[in-house]
Amino acid sequence: MAERLDSTGLAELNAGYLNGSVNGIHSYEECPPDLSPVSPTFLYANRIIAFDSDSSMAHAYDVLRNQLLNEHRDEDTRVISVTAPTSGCGTTVTAINLALSFARVPGSNVLLVDANFRDPAIGNVLGLPPRPPLEDPIRGWLTTLDIRGLHCHLLRTAWGPGRIPLPADLARMTAQVEFARQMLKPTIVLFDLPPMLSSDEVIPFVDMSDTAVIVLAIGKSRLPELEICRSYLGSEKSMQVVLNKTKRHGL
């Protein structure tokens, strides 16, 4: 259905959703996302550990979370992009762990968005079904993760790997995000994005964000790449840098 809609049709459909005229959806209470239990054992095997407050490895994500919380305290909703200069730096693992770390904060309401159209990976990392339960171009793959009673909303806007998104695809993804934000009223929105230096579709989501987390990897990332990413963000955007894939140390 989404492939048959141009940007105009998506805008009209999105307006209908936000006005409550499509399928009678008005709020989260009236039509909550499906609950998707996730296996902790499966998560540990995929290096997803931040749901476990007793894990010493979750401490690094909690430190980053606290630094991000200290920024833009006056905003009701924080919107954070997680990206990297190039592929293979560990953006998806970082985004999921950071989202779960935020979800452990009392009173938080976290929405994690897989917006990596060229290589969507969050579903695979979490062990979720590869195809959506709905053919709904706006609500899409919207679900609530349940990990030992810890909840985090997940919106998979990217519907298949190996595709270069068209303008209508980006319009649909933006409409999905807007609908999810209107329905769920999250306090934290996290975008898992493709590499910044190899995909133009990063820009609309970075523009929606107040902060960008740039993931670098030992042996893959170079300082000039980070400087280029910084120049793309501009001076008004906050930035945090994560150094990933380091060797064990005694710190």
Image: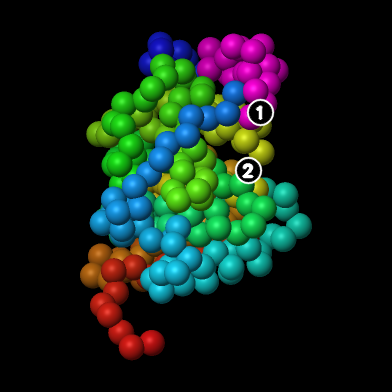
Q: Residue at x 64, y 57 (%)?
A: 106
Q: Is residue 17 magenta?
A: yes
**Which of the 4 image quarters holds residue 119?**
top left
Please state which of residues 32 and 157 is positioned toward the viewer in this rendering.
32
Q: Residue 65 in the image: state x and y as whole percent.
A: 55, 64
Residue denoted by label 2? 186
- Is residue 119 covered in magenta? no
Q: Is residue 189 above or below residue 101?
A: above
Please identify the quadrant where the N terminus is shown: top left
Q: Residue furthest right?
A: 74
Q: Position of residue 66 (x, y in %)?
A: 59, 68
Looking at the rendered image, the quarter that the C terminus falls into is bottom left
Q: What element does badge 2 sit on?
A: loop
Assess whether mark 2 and mark 1 are in contact (beta carbons under 8 angstroms): no
Mark 1 or mark 2, which is nearer to you? Answer: 1
Which disc, if any, is residue 4?
none
Q: Is residue 84 left or right of residue 233?
A: left
Residue extent of the magenta highlight:
9-30
In the image, residue 134 above or below residue 212: above
Q: Which residue is mark 1?
A: 29
Q: Position of residue 12 (x, y in %)?
A: 60, 14
Q: Amino acid at mark 2?
A: Pro
Label 1 residue SS: loop
